[in-house]
Structures are given as structure tokens and as C-alpha cells.
Image: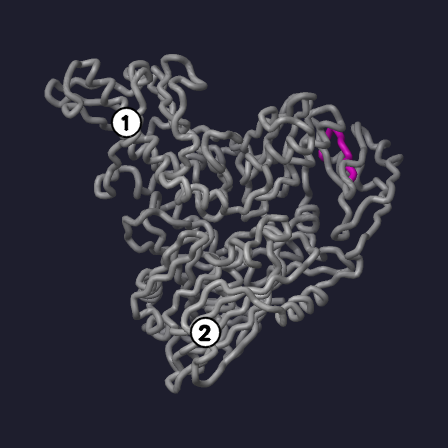
């Protein structure tokens, strides 16, 4: 199985119509005792009344181990307090298990509902048969089946064996949103207690008997290779048991302790062939973007004819750097190679890709590679890669012991994949009143999918159409892309191209509003006044101007947009849609020593039905802080073919003392849930830069602000 686009599983789910049906039905009793009731891959009920819900997505802080079981428990009519959660490893039972594209709830909403409803209906049938009464006289209530006429009841556990003998229904009734008892509630996250107590097992925490620790010395130059190495001094370190070449660009040191492996690596003498990129630097990368801008572009979206629009032309260029994911838990994976099989304990967003890549690297059948998915301390797209899993497997095979391969923070920063740099050429033709009659956005950026060898149909990265969506009601629009080349390794990072597109689009809209002498909120609302739908074919998304207008107005109202601010305070606003969701944000700042100090961010979101409002708030707040760090300081630079930044001293996130108050408001909705992990990221930077302009009258057209 080749590495997938981070959202290909979304398209696959849509193609299946009803959702991820691949793993929906299981043979009765598959993987359980005969008395257990397991009508599908997601739920298991045992005679002792234990109800287990299986989560097939990876938990990296976004709350899926709580939100997804809530969906199933709702339809099952289960007692939430008695639910147990089980993390699925890599399996064929659930379709694609990739966790990305803010799609966990969106793509499992229907499968989880149908799984719970099917189990519920079978339990009702089992009770009716037991009592010899009509099914219609029985009802499921909080983990029991009740017969109101005789006041009899049986627990799900008591009915498990009989229910397991019944045929699995294929067309089950689903609840209406007005009848929800669990979905929509602020239930506590199931993983919080173990994390507070220090009992939760992240990938970096995992231990097993006989395990050793491995660190790799990787070529510091992009695309470089090993010439030779001398391990004489490394082997003198107590506990070092193995030193060896693992790939053309990495040497592994294995020891009994992390410190031993670190010391062994420090003393390792490697001669590197710096390769073709030894002179590469950031200036060359940026010059490459400017040169690529002259190439023929490919259309992402168009309306009308921008070439025929008459009026005054306004234009601007925006520039964004490479950025690192920088999750708090650096890369790691534990592998135990056992000759004909291998077992992994991996903090991964793509367990199936880990399985398949490891199988290929070891020459094993994928069925002989078991992947256990651990908790992870942040992902942000970095764990869509599986280099750390392949490394661990190869080191375990070479050292003939279970090995946990660890990346240091510097490893994670300098040997990673990066969100691509991009250049944006934006222009508009405005009429006498300052309203745009034409809008053009040319996006010049490398393609992540293309660099990874995936299809780029028509010269368009498959993520771009959705992530660069333009929803304003301008009669003539052209959004197009030009692919630039870069040897810098690329990866999907939280909100990916949407962050870039939003910064350019929304910053330029703000410039147009200012030039027209109009309020930036009213300017946007005017362009969204006409209800209009725009279909994006790849992500099967239909964008509605009315919904974008709704989040803009809600954010503005909650922020008190029309009310005067205290002296020295300024604010900006922006909105954007991606992953089928709509977000608007108002950022309130003051200026301290010529730098913005963010005091308050008000975010409004329309993501359809909210499963758990508390988790929604946490995701939006986390996204805002992530985006603020990126906007203020995040920048990866290249010198002599090497990444310069190495730790949080020169790639600094927002500190607690810099963190603003973040208020979150959701538009009430019964629409199908859409993405929420990433959509809060794109509007932050343009809203912040809008506030800086309000304070200083200076435009920021390149990030980071404090570069």
C-alpha cells in the first residue's frame, strides 16, 4: 500500500456512499467469545454487561477517543458512564484509518451511528423474543431494554448471547437530533484522568521487557548520504550494544539507556557526502518561487472573465516561509522484529501506512506486521509520515532486540518534513465605490503530494481546491496555481494550504476595504450578501455564502465590533472556510515595543452538528494558539543545505504569559458534522495583521511578523 494523500480516505468514504462500510459488518462472535455480542467492528457487549466501543482513529489531543464513542453510544442508547474505550490498531475492518484533514467525526459520523443503531435494534429483538412480546412494545433506555406494560427489563449484557444469534439488520432507524441525549453534551473526556495521573501511555512512554534505545545520526544536509563512519569511540560507551548503517543517510546507535545511545551517537564519527543541495539556502528557495511565478498556471476555480473586468487594478504579493510541525512529543516508535513478524508501538496518524511501509522495508507480508496505536503528544500532520516506524523496525531487525527509536528535539526540527513556502500574487479590479468586480489569486508553491510521488492531476495538488476556496460574491474570479520545485522535504501541516491561502486572500480583502474607506466587517458582509453556492469537486464540498456570513456576524457581535475599544487597543477580523467548515475570528491587540500583544481572540465556527461543545472549544482554542505561534515567529530557514532552527529557543512557540483569552462560539446546527481540528488556524494570521494595520497603518505581507 503506497502512502496516501492525507484526505484520500475522505474521498473513499464518500465514494462508498454510506460511509466506511468496508469494516461495518463482522461474522457473529468474530474475535470474541461465543456469548459476546459484536454485530460490527465498533462495538462489543459481553454477558457481564461490559460495553466496549472501538475507536479506529488516532488520539493526538483532539478528543476522538471521546467524541467518536459518543456518536455510537447515542444510537446504542447506552449508559455513557459504563462505556469502555478500546483503541484499534492497524486493521482492514474500518476502511482507511488515517487521522487527518479534520475528518475523524465527518467520515465516521454515519458508520458509528449505524453501528450503534444496529446493535440497539438487535438487542430489542432479543428482548422481545425472550419475553414473547411484540418488538414495538420494547424500548432501549440507558443500557437496558424495557417492557413498559409489564415493567420488565433486561440489561444489554443479559441479552448479549441471544442478540449474537440474530441476523444483522441492514437498514436501521437513526435518531433525530432533537432526541439526542449524549451528542451535543459537554461530557468529560475519557482520557483526561489517566493523563492527569501520569498513567497515560504515549509513544515515548512505552516500555517492554528487554527493550533497548536507539538514536540515529542522520545526514544534516538535505539529500546527503553516508561516505563512511568510525564507531570505535561509540562502542566504548557502557551499554552500547549495536552501531550500524540503517539507510544511505543514517547510522543507528543502540544502547541500554537513552543516555548511552545519545553519548554513543555524539562520539560517532561520520563522514558525509553533502550531495547536490550543499549550497541551498532560503534566498535560493524564495527566488525559485519568483521564477516559477512566470510559468503557466492551472485553474483551481473561476467565475466570469477577469480579463474583461473594467476599473482600477490593485495588486499585492504575500510570502510565507517553510514551517515545522514541532509537536511537543518528538518522533519515536518501538519495534520488535521477530524474524517472520514485527510488532510496533507507534504514535501514528496512519497505522495502516506504518504497517505497509514496515512490511515492505522488512520484506514481510503486511498481515505479519502488527501496529499498536499509542497516544501522541501532538501530531499536526507530522505523524502522517511513517519514517520513524520504518527506522525502528530496521534497527530492531539489525540489533535483534526490541528497540525504541527516539528523535531528539533537534532531530525533529532538522530532519523532518515541512509545510511548503509559498508566494501569492493577488489582484483585484475595483469599481468607483471600491467594490471588487474581479479577483485573481495566483498561488505559487511546491506540491506536497507531487513530491511524495502521488498523482497531481492537471498540475493541481489534490488538497488545494478545498483549501484555497474563495466564497465571496465577486462576479469575475480566477484562483490558479503554479507548482514550484524544491528539494526541501515537504509534509502536510495543520490546515496546510488553507493557512497560506487565507493569509493572502483575507489580508488583501482587508487592504481593499481600507482603500475603499470601508469597515472591514461591512466590506466582507457586503460581498457575502447574495446567497451563493460554490461546489468544490475534490472534497465534495458546497460552500454557502450565507453560512460564512453567519460566522462573521456572530464573531463580530460577540467581540463587540461596533463598540469603542479602550485606548491603545486595536482589532482586526478575518474569515475562511476549509474542511467543509466556516470560521471567523476577531483579534484584539495592543502594541508593545513595536510588536503586537494579543489580548483576546473571539472565534465563531459553523461545523454542523457539534458532538461535544467542550471538545470543540478546546480544538478551536488550541488551533488559535498554534496559529498565533506560527504568525508571530515560526520560520524554517536553510543555510548550506541544512535546516538552521533546532529547538524552541530559535523556533519559539507562544509562551503562557503571551497567551490571549480565546472565546469560542458555535452556530447552532443540525447539519452533518464537518471538520474542526484545523479550520480555526487560517483566519488568525490575517485577522492579527489587520489589527496591526489598525494600530500602525503598516501592512504585513510576509510571515512571520517578528522575523
Is 320 rendered above or below residue 451?
Answer: below
Q: Which mark is residue 644?
A: none
134 shown above or below 286: above
Labels 1 & 2 near each other (Cβ < 8 A): no
Residue 439 is labelled as: 2
Question: Residue at (53%, 36%) from the top-left corner?
Answer: 375
Q: Tell me the residue that label 1 is attached to.
A: 120
Residue 551 visible from this viewpoint: no
Residue at 44 percent across and 73 percent down: it is 509
- Residue 524 picture quarter: bottom left
Q: Secondary structure at mark 1?
A: helix
Eye-nearest disc, 1 or 2: 2
Tell me the element at label 2.
strand
Q: Is residue 676 magenta?
A: no
Residue 330 x, y percent position in the rendering: 63, 43
State which quadrant residue 583 falls in.
bottom left
- Rounded to the nearest angstrom, the CA distance separating label 1 from label 2 is 53 Å
Residue 484 visible: yes
Residue range in magenta is: 251-258
Sequence-wise, the earlier of marks 1 and 2 is: 1
Quarter containing the N terminus: top right
Q: Badge 1: how crowded within 10 Å, few (<14), some, or many (20+)?
A: many
Amino acid at each position: 500500500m503506497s502512502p496516501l494523500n492525507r484526505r484520500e480516505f475522505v474521498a473513499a468514504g464518500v465514494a462508498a456512499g454510506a460511509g466506511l462500510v468496508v469494516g461495518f459488518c463482522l461474522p457473529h462472535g468474530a474475535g470474541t467469545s461465543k456469548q459476546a455480542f459484536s454485530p460490527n467492528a465498533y462495538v462489543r457487549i459481553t454477558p457481564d454487561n461490559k460495553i466496549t466501543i472501538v475507536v479506529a482513529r488516532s488520539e493526538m489531543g483532539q478528543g476522538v477517543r471521546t467524541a467518536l464513542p459518543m456518536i455510537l453510544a447515542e444510537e446504542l442508547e447506552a449508559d455513557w458512564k459504563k462505556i469502555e474505550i478500546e483503541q484499534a490498531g492497524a486493521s482492514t475492518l474500518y476502511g482507511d484509518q488515517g487521522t487527518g484533514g479534520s475528518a475523524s467525526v465527518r467520515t465516521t459520523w454515519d458508520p458509528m451511528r449505524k453501528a450503534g443503531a444496529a446493535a440497539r435494534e438487535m438487542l430489542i429483538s432479543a428482548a422481545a423474543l425472550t419475553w414473547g412480546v411484540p418488538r414495538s412494545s420494547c424500548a432501549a433506555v440507558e443500557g437496558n431494554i424495557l417492557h413498559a406494560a409489564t415493567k420488565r427489563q433486561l440489561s444489554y449484557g443479559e441479552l448479549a448471547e441471544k442478540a449474537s444469534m440474530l441476523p444483522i439488520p441492514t437498514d436501521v432507524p437513526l435518531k433525530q437530533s432533537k432526541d439526542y441525549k449524549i451528542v451535543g453534551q459537554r461530557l468529560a473526556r475519557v482520557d483526561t484522568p489517566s493523563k492527569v495521573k501520569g498513567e497515560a501511555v504515549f509513544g515515548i512512554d512505552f516500555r517492554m521487557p528487554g527493550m533497548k534505545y536507539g538514536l540515529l545520526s542522520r545526514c544534516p544536509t538535505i539529500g546527503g548520504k553516508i561516505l563512511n563512519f568510525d564507531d570505535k569511540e561509540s562502542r566504548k560507551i557502557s551499554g552500547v550494544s549495536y552501531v550500524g548503517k540503517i539507510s544511505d543517510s543514517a547510522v543507528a546507535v543502540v544502547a541500554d539507556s537513552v543516555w548511552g545511545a545519545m553519548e554513543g551517537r555524539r562520539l560517532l564519527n561520520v563522514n558525509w557526502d553533502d550531495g547536490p543541495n550543499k549550497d541551498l539556502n532560503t534566498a535560493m528557495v524564495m527566488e525559485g518561487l519568483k521564477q516559477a511565478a512566470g510559468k503557466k498556471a492551472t485553474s483551481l476555480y473561476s467565475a466570469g472573465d477577469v480579463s474583461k473586468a473594467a476599473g482600477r487594478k490593485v495588486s499585492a504579493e504575500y510570502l510565507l516561509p517553510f514551517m515545522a510541525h514541532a509537536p511537543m512529543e518528538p518522533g519515536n516508535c518501538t519495534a520488535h522484529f521477530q524474524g517472520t513478524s514485527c510488532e510496533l508501538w507507534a504514535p501514528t496518524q496512519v497505522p495502516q501506512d506504518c504497517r505497509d511501509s514496515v512490511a515492505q522495508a522488512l520484506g514481510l507480508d503486511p498481515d505479519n506486521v502488527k501496529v499498536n496505536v499509542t497516544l501522541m503528544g501532538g501530531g499536526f500532520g507530522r505523524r502522517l509520515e511513517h519514517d520513524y516506524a520504518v527506522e525502528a523496525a530496521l534497527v530492531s531487525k539489525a540489533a535483534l532486540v526490541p528497540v525504541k527509536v527516539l528523535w531528539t528535539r533537534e532531530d525533529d526540527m532538522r530532519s523532518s518534513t515541512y509545510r511548503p513556502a509559498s508566494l501569492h500574487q493577488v489582484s483585484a479590479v475595483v469599481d468607483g465605490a471600491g467594490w471588487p468586480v474581479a479577483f485573481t489569486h495566483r498561488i505559487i508553491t511546491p506540491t506536497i503530494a507531487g513530491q511524495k510521488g502521488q498523482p497531481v492531476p492537471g498540475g493541481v495538488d489534490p488538497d488545494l481546491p478545498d483549501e484555497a476556496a474563495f466564497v465571496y460574491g465577486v462576479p469575475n474570479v480566477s484562483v490558479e496555481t503554479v507548482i514550484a520545485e524544491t528539494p526541501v522535504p515537504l509534509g502536510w501541516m495543520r490546515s496546510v494550504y488553507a493557512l497560506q491561502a487565507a493569509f493572502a486572500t483575507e489580508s488583501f480583502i482587508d487592504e481593499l476595504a481600507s482603500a475603499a474607506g470601508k469597515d472591514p466587517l461591512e466590506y466582507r458582509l457586503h460581498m457575502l450578501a447574495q446567497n451563493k453556492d460554490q461546489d468544490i469537486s475534490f472534497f465534495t464540498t458546497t460552500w454557502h455564502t450565507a453560512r460564512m456570513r453567519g460566522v462573521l456576524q456572530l464573531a463580530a457581535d460577540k467581540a463587540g465590533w461596533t463598540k469603542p475599544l479602550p485606548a491603545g487597543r486595536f482589532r482586526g477580523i478575518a474569515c475562511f472556510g476549509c474542511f467543509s467548515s466556516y470560521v471567523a475570528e476577531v483579534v484584539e491587540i495592543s502594541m508593545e515595543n513595536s510588536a503586537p500583544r494579543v489580548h483576546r481572540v473571539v472565534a465563531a465556527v459553523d461545523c454542523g452538528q457539534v458532538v461535544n461543545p467542550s471538545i470543540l472549544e478546546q480544538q478551536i482554542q488550541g488551533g488559535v494558539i498554534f496559529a498565533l505561534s506560527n504568525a508571530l515567529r515560526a520560520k524554517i530557514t536553510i543555510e548550506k543545505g541544512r535546516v538552521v532552527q533546532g529547538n524552541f529557543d530559535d523556533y519559539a512557540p507562544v509562551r503562557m504569559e503571551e497567551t490571549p483569552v480565546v472565546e469560542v462560539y458555535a452556530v447552532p446546527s443540525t447539519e452533518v458534522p464537518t471538520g474542526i481540528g484545523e479550520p480555526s488556524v487560517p483566519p488568525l494570521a490575517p485577522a492579527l495583521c489587520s489589527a496591526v494595520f489598525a494600530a500602525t497603518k503598516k501592512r504585513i505581507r510576509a510571515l512571520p511578523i517578528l522575523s
